[in-house]
Structures are given as C-alpha cells and as structure tokens.
Amino acid sequence: AQSVTQLGSHVSVSEGALVLLRCNYSSSVPPYLFWYVQYPNQGLQLLLKYTSAATLVKGINGFEAEFKKSETSFHLTKPSAHMSDAAEYFCAVSDDTGRRALTFGSGTRLQVQP
Amino acid sequence: DTGVSQDPRHKITKRGQNVTFRCDPISEHNRLYWYRQTLGQGPEFLTYFQNEAQLEKSRLLSDRFSAERPKGSFSTLEIQRTEQGDSAMYLCANSALQGPQETQYFGPGTRLLVL
C-alpha cells in the first residue's frame, strides 16, 4: 500500500518569504509523486509531478520539488511567496501497477501574510 | 481550465433523495476517475473507467453509489437514498494513458449538501 503524509495542516508565511510544504511518502515500488493546488470551491490544478526523469522538478507558478529517496520525501518549495499562492496544497502518490489512482495527503493550507 | 467539466457545480438535496452528477472529460482521454473530498481532507478514490469499462471500485463506494460511462465519453455518478454523510465534493479526473507518466486533470467538482 502506498501513502503520503503532509506535515503541517496550516502554514503561514509572509509575502516574499520562502515557502516550504512537506510531504513524505510510503511506497513499496518506485512512486510517482504529484503536487496539486486547490483554490476555494475549485477543483485541483497540477503544480508538478515526479516520474523518475529528474529528482528536482520544476512546476508552474515558480514552485519546485525535490525527490529524495533516502528521506522518502518530496517537499514543495517556492523562493518568494505571493499573495496569490494562498490555497490548499495536496501531495499525491501513484505507482506503475496499472490502476494509478492517486492517493492524496490530507493537505496543507498556505496562508500568505502581507 | 483543464477542459474537464462537471455539472451541477452545487447540489442541495434532502436525505433520502437520489442525485446524479455528470462529468464531461477531455474527448481524447480514455481514463476517467471519480474521487470524493470531505471538508479538510484530501480526495479519496471512488472508481475509475478505461473507456466504457469500469475497472475498479473503492470500498468507499457503497451499494447506493453507481457510476456509468456509456460509450466511453461522459460519465455519471448516481447516489441513491442520500445520507448526510454523503455531503462532500465529488471530483472527476481525466487522463490519457501515457505509460508511467499519466497525468490526471481534474474538473471543478460538484459540491453536495444533504440536509
């Protein structure tokens, strides 16, 4: 079975500060990892995904994530937070066993203070 | 806009009523997923289709739930005899099977409130 754990249900940063959202995964096979963002009353938008091509993955809106197998982590970062980054962020995992339904973490709500 | 649409966006119903949601995917994408998201939680997998075939159903999908995807195009999710615990956001996701690099694109969701 595969799972992800997102540490910190709420993260608050100042505008212009570093954003760090944590995700640790558990998988018995090489995982595929995703970060999605959800704005209020909307569906999920893909930020970035890891599929083993490169350990540092760059996504949209200036976000990036680094896959660290030794730490079973896939943390999301952004050098400088913007007010528009305020949203819910979800880490998700799937694998190459055919079904590929995503297993999501419980989410981290990012607040950006002016 | 991912190209995946869902209808209705909001639904309020009374306990015991039946409801049906629709998902219109990106036309050339052959995999379609349904997820349920309760308040403060991440989405949970319900079921998925490859073309018109329903290949897997989660244990979350009780007998009151049924999903269809006729002709491998749009999909419907019906809940019979709704209960207050069914209140949630129901999300549809669509993907093209591209080997290991499958990416799921989500619709805006249908928010269900059962009174």
Image: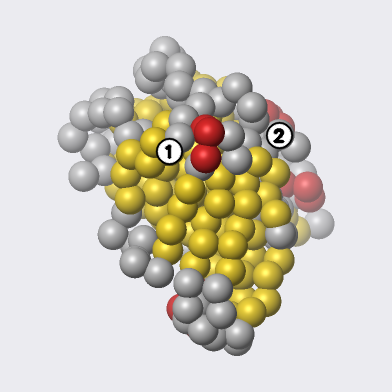
Chain letter belonging to callout 1: B
SS for callout 2: loop
User: Are there few (<14), some (14-19), or many (20+) residues within 10 Å of tag 1?
Assistant: many
Callout 1 amino acid: Phe
Chain letter belonging to callout 2: B
Residue A76 in the image, given as x and y percentages of width and height: 52, 38
Callout 2 amino acid: Gly
List the residue tagged with mark 2: B3
- Answer left or right for B106 relative to B60: right
Q: Residue at x 24, y 37 (%)?
A: A27
- Numbered mark located on residue B49 in the image: 1
Q: Residue at x 47, y 78 (%)?
A: B81
**Where B109 falls versus A77 (above or below)?**
below
Residue A24 in the image, given as x and y percentages of width and height: 35, 44
First of labels 2, 1 by sequence position? 2
Q: Residue at x 48, y 48 (%)?
A: B68
Furthest residue toward front: B71
- Answer left or right for B30 relative to A37: left
User: Are there few (<14), some (14-19), or many (20+) residues within 10 Å of tag 2?
Assistant: few
Q: Residue at x 45, y 21 (%)?
A: B97
Residue A93 occupies quadrant: top left
Residue A45 occupies quadrant: top right
**Where A85 falls versus B9 (above or below)?**
above
**Where B9 falls versus A77 (above or below)?**
below
In terms of depth relative to the viewer, which is nearer, A45 or B7?
B7
Disc 2 from disc 1: Cα separation: 18 Å
Do dots 2 and 1 share one subunit? yes
